[in-house]
Image (tube, coloured by chain):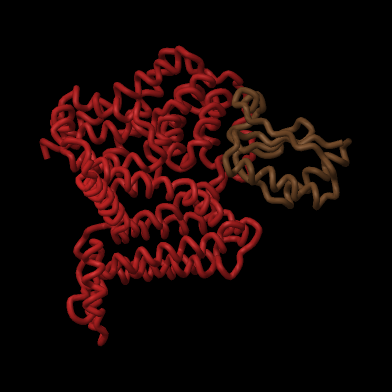
Chain colours: A red, B brown
Amino acid sequence: MDIDPILSYIGTLLVAGWTGLLDYLAAHVLLCLLPAFFIAGALTALVPKEAVTKYLGPRAPKFVSYPAAAVGGFVLAVCSCTILPLFAGIWKRGAGLGPAITFLFVGPAVNILAIAYTGAAIGMDIALARIVLSIIFGIGIGLIMAAMFGGEAVVGDESLARMGAGEARVRPAIWVFFGLLVALLIAGTLQVEVLTESWLTVTLPVNVPAGLVAMLEGLNLTVQGALLIGLLALIGIASWLGLEHVAEGLNGWTGVTLALVAGTLLVAAPRLDTAGSITVEFTGRFVVVAVLLTALGLVAVRGLERHEVQEWLWETWRFVKQIFPLLLMGVFGAGVFKVIIPPEWIQALAGENTLFANFVGVVFGVFMYFPTLVEVPIARMFLDLGMARGPLLAYLLADPELSLQSILVTHKIMGGKRNVAYVGLVAVFSTLAGWLFGLALAVT
Amino acid sequence: MIEIKVLGTGCPRCKRVEQVARDAMAAAGVDATIIKVTDMGEIMAYPILGTPGLVINGEVVSSGRIPAVSEVTTWIMNALASD
């Protein structure tokens, strides 16, 4: 039997996966994901739940509790293990079924990591649409469920408002810290002239050996790309040493890890050209990132307490461990499947913005379960295979919302009838959201 | 005797709370049983907002966050004093 064609096909698949990985590890994605993980860690560690839940008491008026639930979905719920118990808590002890459902819907949809990654890998239009439509429809679904099933809290007491009312304030220093982190995320990814134009171009009197450049090109890598991957590997090692036990104390390796992260952002920010001697274009982005990193360092040292920094780093590292390895595999897999799946299938099913195509997107999302964030490279793969942007949004909304596992837990919490209603409403609204988005794109 | 319950479905944060509880017990010089409640139905029977939750002698002392070892030590001492 001639196995050469099989081997060469497997080779093609592996190359496809590798290329997918490289796109993912490209500078602009790193510049968004690295800060996003730190933001996720900060949201979990530094924002006390009471700051939001005090607006979700049983006597809160609707125009307060629904928006608060949506904000809560964004701020409080980065991890699915947090969302489900909180959902149950808000329903049974607080504002009732409506706001709880809103929270349940908005939480996975507006996950900061997913939004940042969607923006960098697919486009800001979809990322923004994801946020806006999730909030609107989240409130809508909540109101409908409350109307269908009656929204009163099961335990109509003030225990929610009472609980930990003292910790409900968020200190100014923390607001500033968040502002800087978000600014860093935006500065790293925004494509605006101020950031992309070079303020200073330096030519280093060093040549990268032509052989090295050629070898890297053979692997589809630029010198900057290779540098970044190397730095990422170093961050991984340093993090194991410096962040794994950061809850117990900061050590030297913690500092090394943070320095490496800052360094990676600074290496990703400028433009590097290696034809001949090395030319480094220090773009506006580089300057802004450098300034923000310095400011962040200052605020962390002077405005945050030591245990807060430790909590922040512990939560950040927890997310990285939980998400990043699976994400790498998902990206590789998406690269492979892009070569295997015939584009004609995708285009036939979802190539145009019809209601049916959007529904197909939702069905994909519900039945194909992917770990957090992996839905983004899969969506990118669908996009490259020809899926229209409307159905793509429908998929991106439905996938994190509904998985077999989460449906089982929500069934346990709210019972069969409500659960079926919820799943149905999510499917309908995701389809509508995607379709409307597609229409809006066609008009603008 | 103190009874400590950790409410949580088993994610890293819940494990952290269990570790904090153990450290606090050691700091307080107390030996206690730690019971892990992982069933969602049982968890929601307690008046908590979100997991992880910490219950000492039947009273919810913390919910939805990871308390510091010093806090838990204080709570354990209080529970001992009121025994």
Location of the C terminus of chain B (image quadrant): top right
Q: Is residue A18 above or below residue A388?
A: below
- Closer-to-camera residue (B26/A38): B26
* Residue at x 65% of width, y 28% of height: B47
Q: Is residue A359 above or below residue A69?
A: above
Measured from the top left, where is residue A334 in percent x and y? 29, 43
Q: Quadrant of residue A394?
A: top left
Measured from the top left, where is residue B48 in percent x and y? 63, 31
Q: Quadrant of residue B49?
A: top right
Location of the N terminus of chain B (image quadrant): top right
- Closer-to-camera residue (A224/A45): A224
Residue B20 in view of the camera:
yes
Residue A302 in view of the camera:
no
Residue closest to the far left: A443
- Closer-to-camera residue (A29/A175): A29
Total tally of numbered discs in the picture: 0
Q: Is residue A178 left or right of residue A363?
A: right
Measured from the top left, where is residue A262 in percent x and y? 42, 67
* Residue at x 15% of width, y 30% of height: A353
* Residue at x 66% of width, y 44% of height: B17
Residue closest to the far bottom: A205
Q: Is residue A428 left or right of residue A64?
A: left
Measured from the top left, where is residue A37 in percent x and y? 44, 52
- Closer-to-camera residue (A310/A214): A214
Residue closest to the far front: A1
